[in-house]
Amino acid sequence: MKHKITVQPYDYTCGDGCCSEYNEIWCLNDKEIYRGPQKEEAILNILTELGIKAEILFLVSDDGEEVAGFDNFD
């Protein structure tokens, strides 16, 4: 099965203009899955929606040591 993932920017400014927000809306097959700034969280939410368990690791480039990671293992 082929899936469609869309990423759309959005911005919001409050009525008096004192605060604003810029983020992205991530959709899977036209269903909103995530709204916010964290790409890692968006990707994991999409994988979770597809029934896929995964983790995203951030590595130190020199030696491959794990610095941080995110997963959807509940």
Image (cartoon, rainbow, N blue to C red):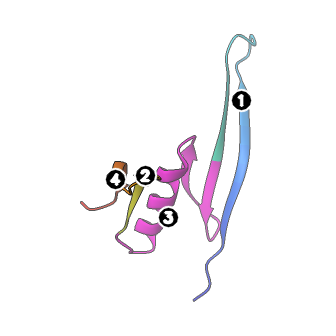
Q: Earlier in the sequence, mark 3 or mark 2?
A: 3
Mark closer to the observer (1, 3): 3
Is residue 11 inside the magenta stretch? no
Q: Residue at x 51, y 59 (%)?
A: 43
Q: Earlier in the sequence, mark 4 or mark 1?
A: 1
Q: Which mark is residue 46?
A: 3
| Highlighted range, magenta | 25-53
Look at label 4 and name its amino acid.
Glu
Look at label 3 and name its amino acid.
Ile
Residue 73 in picture, x, y percent from top left = 27, 62
C-alpha span from label 3 to label 2: 19 Å
Look at label 2 and name its amino acid.
Phe
Mark closer to the observer (2, 4): 4
Residue 32 in picture, x, y percent from top left = 58, 57
Q: Residue at x 45, y 59 (%)?
A: 45
Q: Is residue 56 left or right of 21 when viewed as pictured? A: left
Q: Is residue 15 left or right of 65 when viewed as pictured? A: right
Q: Which residue is mark 4?
A: 65
SS state under label 2? strand
SS state under label 4? loop
C-alpha span from label 3 to label 4: 26 Å
Q: Which mark is residue 12?
A: 1
C-alpha span from label 2 to label 1: 30 Å
Q: Is residue 56 above or below residue 68?
A: below
Contact, CB < 8 Å: mark 2 with mark 1? no
Look at label 1 and name its amino acid.
Tyr
